[in-house]
Amino acid sequence: MKKVNNIAVLTSGGDAPGMNAAIRAVVRAGIYHHLNVYGVMYGYKGMLTNDIFPMESKTVANIIQRGGTILKTARCKEFYEPEGRKKAYENLKKLDIDGLVVIGGDGSFKGAQKFSEEFDIPCIGLPGTIDKDIAGTDFTIGFDTAVNTAVDAIDKIRDTADAHDRLFIIEVMGRDAGYIALHSGIATGAEHVLMPERKSEIDDIINELQANERRKKLVNLIVVAEGDEFGGANGVVKHIKERLPQLDTRVCILGHIQRGGTPTCMDRIIASRLGYAAVEALLDGTHNVMVGVVNDKIAYTPLTQAVKAKQSIDEEWFKIIKILAS
Ligand code: ATP
């Protein structure tokens, strides 16, 4: 097996809390194995612009608890093109880099896959996205923090909803995946959760709100993923206001607060395990895979299969929501 000497790490695509903990793990595990570790700024863009620097143990001191990413992140159009990837390769080759760890989402993995097919630099992907929608892993770095941020915000909204007897429609992130909505909705005792993976019957929701009104249950929370079939909270509120104009209804869009903040214990642990495993994979020749966690064990999925996964959601979740909110 070819010996690995110099590795690089980057963060790409949307940022997610816990990326710093993953960078730290890659750097420290690499140094433990006597590798030279380089940081690439701004994702693939930094590979093209040669924004690459050597990292030491102290470069990653005091970051495990910080949101965002010290390596910054970006999207890079040129990397879609073979000429762009060639330029990136030439810059890595100048430093004799023989392994690349990419922390990002499925798009970043597609880029890594192409790059590793075209050139002799093996790549390892680590799932860093708040959406938890990548095949081959039960969790992604950032999901737990994003959900907890949403839960914290929705708890606060419940206080004001309760004071005014209001219906709140709260939009959380999730253009293609509704896990943040599902988990935060259950954890906050929401009456309804709307998400892209499942068709929601607006008539049923209206009927239930009417029944709740009759029995003087006026505080209701509806959690909506931004990519649901009605186009997020503003789409849902239109339907409800048309049919139930008498209800005191408000919309709250949580937005980017869900991406930031201190990563939770769980995200730090996942990021640390995955970062460590990424270096081990490069050393033992398990190349061009995404490292994930399945049933609490490290699992490797070929980059070609580490795609966005729209899973069907067990109806039992919705039964629980309905029964517990009644
Ligand atoms: P998120 O899930 O947060 O959006 P992502 O990793 O899926 O993260 P993308 O914007 O899809 O984010 O991809 C990040 C970068 O990866 C792109 O800007 C581009 O440089 C590279 N990339 C994505 N898809 C490809 C592809 N098919 N070929 C080459 N490079 C790609």
Image (cartoon, rainbow, N blue to C red):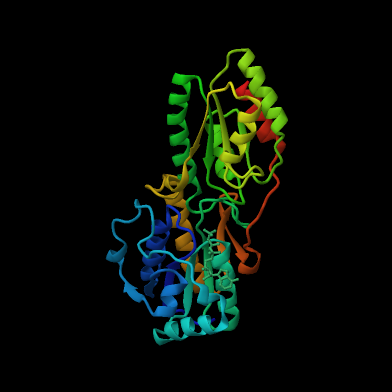
Name the residue: 65% across, 42% down: 230
- Quadrant of residue 289 within the rendered picture: bottom right
Name the outermost residue toward the top: 215
Name the residue: 68% across, 49% down: 311
- Using the image as rendered, state which of residue 304 and residue 193 is in the foreground: 193
Image quarter for ligand 1: bottom right
Q: Which quadrant would the C terminus be assigned to in this image?
A: top right
The location of residue 50, given as percent across then percent down, is 38, 80
- 47 above or below 160? below
Q: Is residue 319 left or right of residue 158?
A: right
Q: Is residue 91 visible?
A: yes
Q: Which quadrant would the N terminus be assigned to in this image?
A: bottom right
Q: Is residue 7 visible?
A: no
The location of residue 156, given as percent across then percent down, is 42, 30
- Using the image as rendered, state which of residue 227 and residue 186 is in the foreground: 227
- Quadrant of residue 57 within the rendered picture: bottom left
